Image: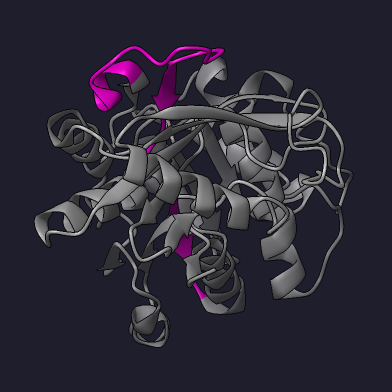
Amino acid sequence: MAATRWSEDAGEILRHVLDQHRAGQACGLVAVTATSGGALRAPGALAAVASDGSMVGYVSNGCVDGDIVAQMLAAMDAQAPRVVRYGAGSPWQDIRLPCGGSVELALIPDPQTAPLADLAKDLTDRRRSEIDLCAVAGERLAGVTADRFTLRPRPALRLAGRGAALGAMARTGVAAGFAVSVASPDPGDLEDLAALGLTRAHHLALPGNLPPVADDADTAVVLLFHDHEWEPALLCQALDGPAPFIGAMGSRRTHAARLQALRAAGVDEAALARITGPLGLVPSLHEANLIALSALAQVTEHLRNPASATGFHRAA
């Protein structure tokens, strides 16, 4: 099997297919259409397979991806889409999913570029968009369980703060595949993080010197200050937008004082209830890297399933 880039970003995968086609190389689109049991990727997950056998994206942790490449190359030769299934109910009993369950895939060897370009633009512009696999294939996909899925842009993590906690959170977010932007009153922090490939870096010259924002339904806003006078204006700005997660570092006592200051500034209780604090799923941590991991786990819980997010924490 040729090289694999283990991307989970639907926009990146779609852009790769388009780039390959513009370069004159065949590149097919793989879509997870149904799963059962312990499948690694959810329905709607995408991957791309080029005619040289290289792959961007993935379906399993290597269990079946090699055969998917072979199946796609065969579909390219036949010039016809196909639906394949691995695991329970599969005709290939020698290809097993160690986690159990099953995964069904649509393999589209020659996707229509116009709908892919529209989808890629929506995701680049941070809009959720619906992929219609039959439109992408240019024909009905016989035997597929589902052919329409909502694609989400890469999750965004908008950070403001300073020091070790800010740096750890930015690095952890980038490593986890988030689009990370940073605002800090410390130019040294911004310089230190510049090599990460941030989507934006903003110097907070004064507490009211707010960064430009375009929060959306896939954005988390996290404040990481020990000097909390920077927080009120930033929190009010975030509360004016649709971000499903707004959190701030500090103990229960700090959070109570934070909320009281915002009440005094006229922020109502419904808005205050949107602010998570203390930050993180694991309480009473004192190491910046662990605080970042704990906070990012909480962010992920809210972004993926806000209705069931626990927001669990104890007094720091």
**303 or 59, nearer to the observer:** 59
Q: What residue is rendered at 41% in x and 80% in y?
A: 193
Q: Is residue 140 magenta?
A: yes
Residue 48 can be seen in this image: yes
Q: Give the range drawn in magenta.
A: 134-162
Q: Where is residue 32 in the image (x, y as percent from the top left)?
A: 54, 32
In the figure, residue 218 lies in which quadrant?
Answer: top left
Q: Where is residue 110 in the image (x, y as percent from the top left)?
A: 26, 38
**63 or 179, nearer to the observer:** 63
Q: What residue is rendered at 63% in x and 39% in y?
A: 41
In the figure, residue 120 lies in which quadrant?
Answer: top left
Q: On the rendered structure, is 170 left or right of 36?
A: left
The C terminus: image quadrant:
bottom right
Q: On the rendered structure, is 248 left or right of 284?
A: left
Q: On the rendered structure, is 41 left or right of 211?
A: right
Residue 211 can be seen in this image: no
**40 or 255, nearer to the observer:** 40
Q: Position of residue 135 (x, y in %)?
A: 25, 18
Q: What residue is rendered at 55% in x and 52% in y?
A: 58
